[in-house]
Amino acid sequence: MEHLQKALTVLFATLLLLAPLLMATDPDPLQDFCVADLSGRLSVNGYPCQPSAAAGDKFLFSNRATRGGDPMANPNGSNVTELDVNEWPGLNTLGVSMNRVDFAPGGTNPPHIHPRATEIGVMIRGELLLGIIGSLDSGNRYYSKVVRAGETFVIPRGLMHFQFNVGKEPATMVVSFNSQNPGIVFVPLTLFGSSPPIPTPVLVKALRVDAEVVELLKSKFTGGY
């Protein structure tokens, strides 16, 4: 009896330790699909569902993976065609999304973070320098490789990364996320183009530069990307 009580105590303690982990995962969907009603209020698990009769080819399939804009029209020389839940309501509650990114020669997808998703991608054409910067735990280590057509890569959730077209021709990649809305934080825009702006003395101290440098950088990001 004493051994049984000890075993039950250990089991109970183990379940208490595992409880936060078990509760941290997304719940499984309880229906085939839940096409997002984007006019509804966003909750923790996604948008409310449209009536099932409204779903079909229009929502379960998308033809928007073609280039959505001219990369040369963007100061960064790149164009992102987003296919998250806001652009593709059929992704609601499924925990996935994707982007297509086109690069002009010399174009870049600036240093950024996806706070809610791991990213996996495949190069369709061209060649890109892919850089990933680890956290302070890794000593801010910089990992990089030139990826070419047919090659794949993965970027862990929350790590800063960028892509830069090092080839002489346009480049294209397609990436997927394990979130219907992975989010994106562009580091330069966050620091110098936030609204309202971060106080200049804070950036002077943090970046160890003069106020004139901070003000110049802020002027470059007025109005966003």
Image (cartoon, grey):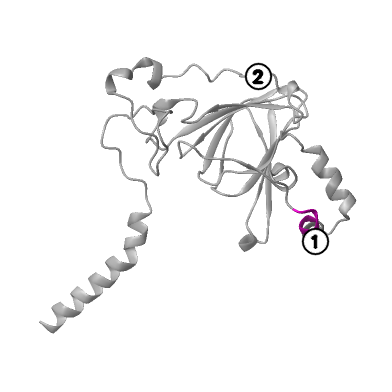
Q: In this view, does 66 lie above or below 41?
A: above
Q: Which of 69 and 199 is in front in this view?
A: 199
At 14% from the left and 77% from the top, the residue drawn is 4
At 54% from the left and 48% from the top, the residue drawn is 157
Span highlighted in magenta in the image: 199-203
Q: Nearer the viewer, residue 142 or 224?
A: 224
The label shown at residue 69 is 2
Q: Where is residue 171 in the image (x, y as percent from the top left)?
A: 68, 25
Q: Which of 34 and 19 is in front in this view?
A: 34
Choose the circle earlier in sequence order: 2 or 1. 2
**Disc 2 element:** loop
**Disc 1 element:** helix
- The residue pinned by badge 1 equals 205
* Residue type marked 2: Gly
Check the picture and name the quadrant holding the N terminus: bottom left
Q: Position of residue 224 (x, y in %)?
A: 71, 35
